[in-house]
Image (cartoon, rainbow, N blue to C red):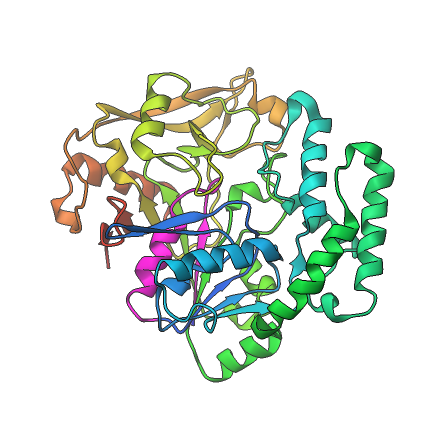
Amino acid sequence: MATIILGSQWGDEGKGKLTDHLLSTNSFDICARAAGGHNAGHSVKTGDQTYSFHLLPSGLMNPNIDNLIGSGVVFNVEAFFRELAELESKGLPRVHERIHISSRCHLNFALHAAVDGLSEQELGTNQIGTTKRGIGPVYSTKALRDGLRVIDLYHESFEQKLRLLAEGYRKRYGELLKYSVEDEIQRFRVYKEQLRPYIVDAVEYMRVVRENKRSVLVEGSQALSMMGYRADGNEESADWLSARFGLRIAHLRNHRNVIGVVKAYVRFPPILTTRVGSGPFPTEQDGDVGQKLQEIGGEILAGVLLPVSGKLLTGETADYTSFNLTKLDVLDTFPTIRAAVAYVTSDGEKLTSFPADLSLLDKCTVEYVDFQGWQSSTHGVRVWSDLPSQAQKYIKFIESSVDTKVSYIGTGQDREDMIFRE
């Protein structure tokens, strides 16, 4: 049986806390990443200690969990060793023994980060707003079949292929590309020996997992709405199929539990949330409401340090079996909760899903439904019946909108600040 945790907005929803909560129940044997890279991340807070995860699966928090970086992940070696050392320094046991890297992961080089920054510059005022960590360029080279995988490190052709890749980018960007391919090659001559103990054939690894009926928690990266519903989306798949293909496991189709993670200031179809990036959002909260959400919600990506603004976004379901609503307590002091139910075009047409044409979206107005705020603390509440009636009403409204139960409700930063509903 596999449980898949997916971000259902633009990332930064709080996936890490749910992952940590589920793993603490000791119901899983494996925690796996299926896609994405080290461009975003999340934090897990337990007691006075905070652990940040970007590339590594947060299953490393649990000493009984084995962890896999799956084939669909774009792998940055420097980030891997840096993050592993940080977790070890904070006292997590046996981290080196409990992490494995698929030999099929595509490598994220310093070259990709350099190119990412130049690509953003070319866009001028239409910049996507990437973290400039090279994720898009890696997936581009993967799609073009001229990217390099972890296993390629051990082939004689590795250095020549990297030089050819750099030469191609040099032809496009010329002297603007500040990058030394020979310096990178020297680094990887060292890395390839350091990496050997961690590398596995992930296809064989997952075959053994399946045959031994071991349970897997798939930790989603980024989010569904970043994978192509907008022009500023991420390049990798962020739905449950990313787990199937990124981990090379076909049996998920009939044996899966898919949990979508959304913030509590969120509703479907259009939803109040936060994100990183650029582009039109008719329901953006630029004033006091947006500032208040940012301050109370602590809307800073782990490690990226980019403040994000409150917005109403469109959510899309992805065959979820349940939802995790996070940060309910952020709304405690709002007298009114506004939920968008449609975008309205200049012709009066109501759109109840996010349009592909962003120029159309930019001209839309918004139809709202207002809810009375509860204006009392829900921080640390762990029982459904202890929530204010207005908060319960709001959550039930979300459930009716998506016809899916909200099974987990986050009420604070601590790993135990969670309501579970059967």
The image shows residue 101 at horizontal and vertical percentages of: 57, 67
| Residue 193 figure quarter | bottom right
State the image coordinates of residue 66 (x, y, percent, origin top left).
44, 72
Residue 300 lies, with reference to residue 361, above or below; the image says: below
Residue shown at the point (66%, 44%) measured from the top left: 136
Q: Quadrant location of residue 355? A: top right
Residue located farthest toward the left when viewing the structure as drawn: 386
The front one of 138 and 338 is 138
x and y percentages locating residue 351 in the rendered image = 51, 29
- At horizontal 27% and vertical 45% (from top left) the residue drawn is 413
User: How many labels, in total?
Assistant: 0
Is any part of residue 271 visible from this angle? Answer: no
Whether residue 44 is situated above or below residue 210 in the rendered picture: above
Residue 205 visible: yes
Left or right: residue 120 compared with residue 305: right
Q: Quadrant of residue 169?
A: top right
Question: In the picture, which quadrant includes the N terminus?
Answer: bottom left
Q: Which residue is nearer to you in this view: 272 or 100?
A: 100
**With 220 as the anchor, is 322 left or right in this view?**
left
Residue at 49% x, 51% y is 54
Q: Is residue 197 above or below residue 3?
A: below
The verdict on residue 19 being magenta is: yes
Comparing 278 with 199, the one in front is 199
Question: As drawn, is 236 to the left or to the right of 371?
Answer: right
Read off the magenta span.
Answer: 2-27
Q: Considering the image in quadrants, where does the C terminus appear?
A: bottom left
**Quick check: 293 above or below 188?**
above
Is 118 contained in the magenta span? no
The picture places residue 32, in percent across and down from the top left corner, at 49, 65
